[in-house]
Amino acid sequence: MTTDPHSLADVFADLERLGAVLDREERARELRADLQARVDRIERETPDDGPRVVVLDWLDPVMVAGHWIPGMVERCGGEYGLASEGDRSRPREWDEIRTYDPEVLVAAPCGFDLDQTLANTDDLTDREGWAELSAVQAGRVYAMDGHNYVNRPGPRLVDTLAYLAGCIHPGSFDVPDDVGTQFPPSPAVDR
């Protein structure tokens, strides 16, 4: 069976399809119901009017995350103005990011775990205008394990949703240390 999900709803539908193929329909329905209950809780516990958010699938060149990420950010009450749910991730000019001026920025490069993402932060922080971004000024830049939590469609995306909710609405959801972390404040920004 081939799957090609582009949204969280597609992931849940694939879960039930896999359950049917594996003769585990009841377990698939139970898992989907549990995952949907977690999503519903996150949606209930986050305000609808959040900040401008960008999630980057790659750092050099910058690539804005598409597929399921735009819809997930919106479920958490964030505004995701550089892509729509189902769009493919694609490279952007740095000036597009600067013009959008995200209030929350999450770096989650495809194939990078958290340590590798943190090791490559200079790909962002050395860019012209980095220190002027609203997200940087507010200390709302995060690194995330893209390999395990962002770039692969599966049930773990519900954990990703909770992490994104915590970034968009600080303090609303706990984030395990192995999933993501806040970037250290930029030395160019006075605190």
Image (cartoon, helix red, strand yellow):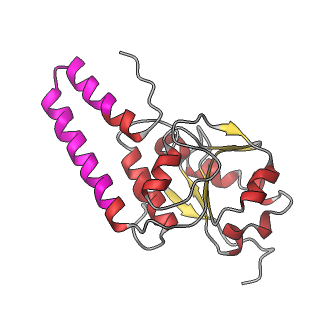
Q: Is residue 69 above or below residue 74?
A: above
The total of numbered circles placed on residues is: 0
Identified at 27% across, 24% down, the residue is: 17
Q: Is the magenta stretch mostly helix, strand or loop?
A: helix
- Image quarter for residue 130? bottom right
As rendered, which of 121 and 76 lies closer to the eye? 76
Residue closest to the far top: 1
Identified at 48% across, 33% down, the residue is: 6
Answer left or right for 88 relative to 185. Answer: left
- Image x and y of residue 32, in percent: 24, 40
Instruction: Point out the image quarter for the N terminus.
Output: top left
- Image x and y of residue 191, in percent: 71, 84
Q: Is residue 65 above or below residue 23?
A: below
Residue closest to the far left: 26
- Image x and y of residue 2, in percent: 40, 17
- Image quarter for residue 98? bottom right
- Residue 176 magenta-drawn? no
The region drawn magenta spans 13-42
Answer left or right for 102 relative to 31. Answer: right
- Whether residue 144 is visible: yes
Identified at 62% across, 37% down, the residue is: 89
Identified at 56% across, 51% down, the residue is: 114
- Image x and y of residue 12, in percent: 32, 36
Answer left or right for 5 relative to 94. Answer: left
Residue closest to the far right: 128
